[in-house]
Amino acid sequence: MAGARARAVILCCGLAVVFTLFSARLIQLQVRDRAHYTRMAADRHSRKQIIPARRGDLLDIHGEVLATNEPVRTVVADGSLIKKDRVDELAELLAGPLEMDSASLSKELKTSRRYLILRKRLPELVANDLKLQMATRGLTGVYFDYDSIRVYPNDSMLSHVIGFVDHQKIGKDGTERTMNRYLQGHDGYRYIERDRKGREIVMYRGQEREARHGNNVRLCIDLGLQNIVENELDEAVRKYQPAGVMCVMMRPRTGEVLALANRPTFNPNQRGDPESGDMKNRAVLDQYEPGSIFKIVAASAALNERLVSPQTLIYCENGRYRYGGSWLKDHHGYGDLSVADIIKKSSNIGSAKLAMQLGDERFHDYIRRYGFGEPTGVALPWEAGGQVNVPNVWSKISITRIPMGHEIGVTALQMVTAMSVIANGGTLMTPMLVKEIQAADGRLVKKYNSVEVRRVISEKTARQMREALARVVAADGTAPLAKVPGFTAAGKTGTAEKVNPNGRGYLAGKYLVSFVGFVPEEDPAFVCLITVDDAAVPSNENYGGLVAAPIFSRIAEKAARYLNLVPTLEEPLDPIVQGHTP
Amino acid sequence: MPATRKRTNTLNFGSMAPWIVGVVFLGVTGLCYVGFKTQMHLTFNKIKVLERELVELNTQNEVLRSQVSTLSSRKQLQRYLDSGFIAMVPIADENIVRLGSGARQIASAMPTVSNLEVLR
């Protein structure tokens, strides 16, 4: 009896020890190491699923799409789900659409890896077709992840303004870069739990945040005008085979950039060699000596300071003027020329004498007031500010060279902005590229208004300058070929030798010729600058008035029609027969 | 005569009632729990299917938007024009209404367009 009792006690004690050990282990798992095992379970079954945000579109002023997204798929193989006896069948099915060799694909599909990328950027329609065929045949182990690529429907048109994005869809150039924070949006996320087969258990969804899609950015660019400009630049490249061509068109009253194009150019859908220079937005990055188009600064400054009137006669030394130990020459010899005629005939000596009347400090002040020497503030990356030396470092002859556009560096955009001052009545405007930001649902997020920087010259001076510049386009001016049928055009030619980038002086026989003008002279609707870099024409024909002015004329005529401007001259416009889309 | 009446145990349902109610309640609650849980599972799966369909539709919409943008782009229209797929018809001279010079317009005649309108 006592033995039975003892055995019972021992059994009880044994059970107590066993249960105590179990309890201790339970406490260890559930209490002491709880965090570790919770994390381990979470790692195995739950994950953060990213809900990608849609990058906003870039639109022109009328809502035409400049940049948008195209859904594509990434084809991924999961070796653990591929049936080994059907690898060849799967490879046979996928090889064609994935543009891969069937044998090598079959080899890849025998992988044990659970995430093997077979192909990126597969078109959505092809992926859908493949998915259907796989489902029909009961094939598993290959799935199609969502992705998207940025597409530019107009290829190279406006490429320098639009820019491009990198593989992570982050803007790298153009407005894609400067407007990236509006376009990009914010990815959402969701914590999910998966079952043994990797399928989501929807019931156990955790914290979730919706994706905030990017905003659409509407530019001031008018694609109709841009198309006119691009076609004419292509024509100019065919005709003159230049090293480069730039064109900027601006609405002077608001500073809105209506069109901007460069040659050479690039297609953002198929970007080539970034070192080639094709991607360079020369209109805002390249600074160059503008030549005679810069004479508008000295002339308008002297008029604004009331040192002269448009009729004041200036003696132009019959074409040869020695100053500071150096000769200054005119293309033709002139005696007395009125200020208006100095502009019309583009006299270097006359311009130098106007600047000398102003004096170094005052002339420099006007150069800066016109916006030269600092970036304009346009919404494009890496804008150059140009080069304007302070009078302290000017040489003795600088006051005679700067008025004719030497010893100074400007960008094409700065030059258009400066001419807009004259066209709009005397106010410097900030070039405006972005009109507004719209949410994905069309709601207005932000509206950009035109920004007046400062008054540079009086309205009276601006009017006097406009009248003088209109004479440049007259039959006896320097740019009769800039005439625009039906309208009184106005503008200024420029012909500058190219600065030697590898040393001092200029490159012999290489010219940068320009014309900057506006239409109509009485109430300018747009200002347009054409700059042709090293046109393949004889030196005696390589002038702004002969090369750039005709391009301006053709662009301005088509632009006037496109904008439905009321003709200001009696001569009728030709019937509209165009070979290009407007 | 011996009594043939079977001896039976009487059940006191009165005292068992709370237990029976408790057990039935627990059973029904358990079944409901399982039923609702299954229902929830099915509903969430339906939600998942609907979500997937929505994503598919959104994707297809995006594809179509992108295709529309590309096919109606100026570059594409220019290609169509060059290939003769579409053509532009010249406007006959007599069908063009010419606007006179702004300065010479009759005061009472309303211009069809003015530069100020264009600038707006």
Image: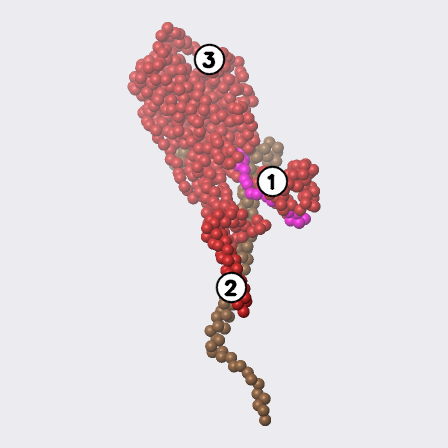
Chain colours: A red, B brown
Say which element carries label 2: helix
Q: Position of residue A23 (x, y in %)?
A: 49, 56
Name which residue lies at 46% across and 20% down: A514
Say which element carries label 1: strand
Q: Amino acid at mark 3?
A: Gly
Foreground tag (1 vs 2): 2
Say few, some or many: other residues with alpha carbon within 10 Å of mark 3 (under 14 / 14 to 19 / 20 or more): few
| Same chain? Circles 3 and 2 | yes
Q: Is residue B19 visible?
A: yes
Point out which mark residue A503 bears: 3
Q: Earlier in the sequence, mark 1 or mark 2?
A: 2
Question: Would you name the residue on which mark 1 appears?
Answer: A116
Task: State the extent of the magenta-drawn residues as a range.
Answer: A133-154
Front-most of B91 and A334? A334
Residue A140 included in the magenta stretch of the image: yes
Q: Position of residue B46 (x, y in %)?
A: 55, 55
Q: Amino acid at mark 1?
A: Leu
